[in-house]
Amino acid sequence: MKKSKSKSTLLNSRKNLLSSFLAAFFIVALSHISFAQPTPPKPFGPVPTKNQIRWQQMEYYAFIHLSTNTFTDQEWGYGEDDPKIFNPEKLDARQWARVCKEAGMKGIILTAKHHSGFCLWPSKYTEYSVKNSNWKGGKGDIVKDLAEACKEYGLKLGIYLSPWDRNYAGYGKPEYITYFRNQLTELLTNYGDVFEIWFDGANGGSGYYGGAKETRKIDASTYYDWKNTYQLIRKLQPNIVIWNDGGERADLRWVGTEDGHVGEKNWSLLNATGDVPREMLRHGVENGDSWVPGEVNTSIRPGWFYHEYEDSKVKTLPRLLETYYASFGRNGTLLLNFPVDKRGLIHENDEKAVLELASAVKKAFAVDLAVNKKVTASNTRGNAKEFGPEKAVDGNNETYWATDDNLKTASLTIDFGKPTTFNRFLAQENIALGQRVKAFKVEAKVGNDWKLLDEQTTIGYKRILVFPSVEATQVRFTITDAKASPVISNIGIYNAPQILTAPIISRNKDGAVNIAAADKESEIYYTTNGSEPNNKSTRYKGPIQADGKLNIRTIAVDAKSGASSPEAAEKFDVSHKNWKLLNIADDKSTAAIDGNPNTAWYQPKDQKLPADLVIDLGKEENLTGFKYLPGQGRTNGIISHFQFLVSSDNQNWKLATEGEFSNIKNNPLTQIKQFNVVKARYVKLRATQNTQGNDEAGYGEIDIITQ
């Protein structure tokens, strides 16, 4: 019995020891599991400030251009116009705010002072402002009106203040910097919070300058003492971001064009110092040492200020959608300009266009097909659920899918569970941790095969890919290269409805008008009498031959659904059928008058400015103006200053008009100059200066305006 009891005691002792050991092991294991929880990825490289993140999240906001220029048909005022001409009698800042809010915009930047120096607020430092205009008897304040309207509609207020002032007598001298900062202080202290301050890159040149009427040159990198100017701005508005196209590096950058797009590869980085050529502006710098994201600025019309002749030139829905996808669909933001008209309102055509864009975008991104779908990944950081692939499709931008450190390639696969049609793909990085992805691709599983949909480079805050509709059961997103382990906050997949594209209208040298639709299956209908076209109008079957003036309005129609495209309209003057260029041996010179905006001719390289282009119109015409389109394929040879002369015999010439094509360097579209009626058979466009200060002169198209 004693021996049996001893064995029992020993067995119990061993059981207790084993239990204790297992308990201890379990506790240690738990502690190890607890301490082995993966830490979030550390920031990599330059990262945005809180102000820059708030700005990026706005994505889309408005520019408002209004000044004395609005009443003089100018883009750049010289600084000498009488302030009394400024009288937008129906000005309604609440209308501006309403349109912007309905368009889905998050803020408005107002050109409080453009290059002419005219101020839209009653600055106590100058008489050249609304206080000496006829508007509201000199008692108005547009900045105040807009600040109140923005507050009412839940929009943020931004301010554009031109560093260049063509009116101020002391511009170019040290005293102007005090004046400039005094005006900055007024704007940044009297109107509430300001989310962005915008400094144009145009600096120095000809101007009124208090009556001196001369040309003044300044060094934009040093004259404004940007370092101390920035300190003043940040002191007055701690939450502001600064846009500056010159001088010391600011928070945001220009993207090198005003045409409405940034490069497909777009790093939100630049170097803190050094020159920034246009290639860097368009694409950023992959290994830059400072976070300087790109802002895409463009106008809803060809010009920045209102011109009645551009009422039919408002950008179409397809064009605006292109800009949408090429701006914050490429890691930028979109600053879309409204040229407020002489009434003081956003024009009906502009409002219609921007609301059509808002509707199309809303429809395109109404349903995210990826949300909460089954998703797998090639790697998850520490195999932790908090960094799992589900975080990329949970509809929450604050969560993200992350991989293990030092892993620079990874894939994520979304399973729809059934064949699904889509044509848009959206990806976002968690930019608070830096911009990392260098290259990626998107594939769709069609049947049993994987089909490549697109291969691209950067992602950044947001990247949207557009491709033909595809039906697939799965989508695979693969990061093929990165600067550090990827952190993807959002993946979205959408099926956007198709948008019919407005037809393209052109007229050749012989007077034949051609109309083309992007979709070859579309039917084209048009009118020539100015009436609105519909599917009962004349159907286009071939070139329309006419030598005289024509007013073409046209639409493309989907024969199956009956849906129609936005309207395209073009007014043509007399045909170029009998025109001849004189004193030019180069056969290619006819490109200047062939009616094709995509062809161009350039003066010989040995031709010094001033350079003449002489046209024989074939017969006398009653002229009231001319049009100049620079070559569209290159940036050199853009005429900035001109003389336009007329003659009846090619011997005796009379000056009809002269001047400058304002802002043509950044906005190289058709320039229209009008003058009092004059009868002539011969015309001469004399290029006196170009945008690059050399002797090149090019012509995409020359046309005349007749009575």
Image: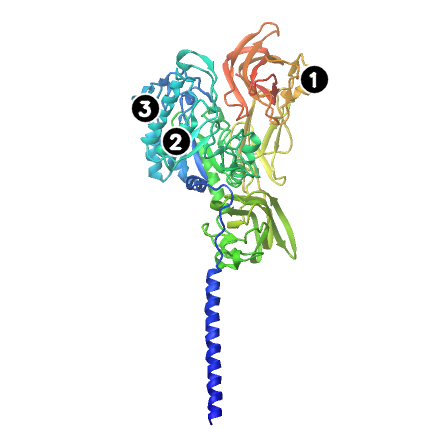
For residue 459, which numbered disc appears in the image? none
Q: Earlier in the sequence, mark 3 or mark 1?
A: 3
> At 61% across and 6% down in the image, what residue appears?
649
SS label for mark 1 = loop
* Crowd rating for badge 1 (residues with CA inside 10 Å; few <14, some 14–19, many 20+): few
- Disc 2 crowd rating (10 Å Cα; few below 14, some 14-19, many 20+) is few
Q: Is residue 224 above or below residue 441?
A: above
Under mark 3, the amino acid is Pro
Marks 2 and 1, how far apart in space? 57 Å
Q: Is residue 286 visible?
A: yes
In the rendered structure, the answer to whether residue 431 lies left or right of residue 98 reads right
Instruction: Give the foreground label among 2 and 1.
Output: 2
User: Mark 2 highlights which residue?
Assistant: 231
Where 189 sits versus 640, above or below?
A: below
- Residues at badges 2 and 1 in contact (C-beta under 8 Å)? no
Residue toward you, 606 or 452: 606
Q: Amino acid at mark 1?
A: Asp
- Spatial CA distance of label 3 from label 1 is 56 Å
Reading the image, the residue beneath label 3 is 122
Quadrant for residue 99, please give it: top left
* Above or below, comparing residue 59 to residue 372 in the picture: above
Residue picked out by circle 1: 586
C-alpha gap between disc 2 and disc 3: 25 Å
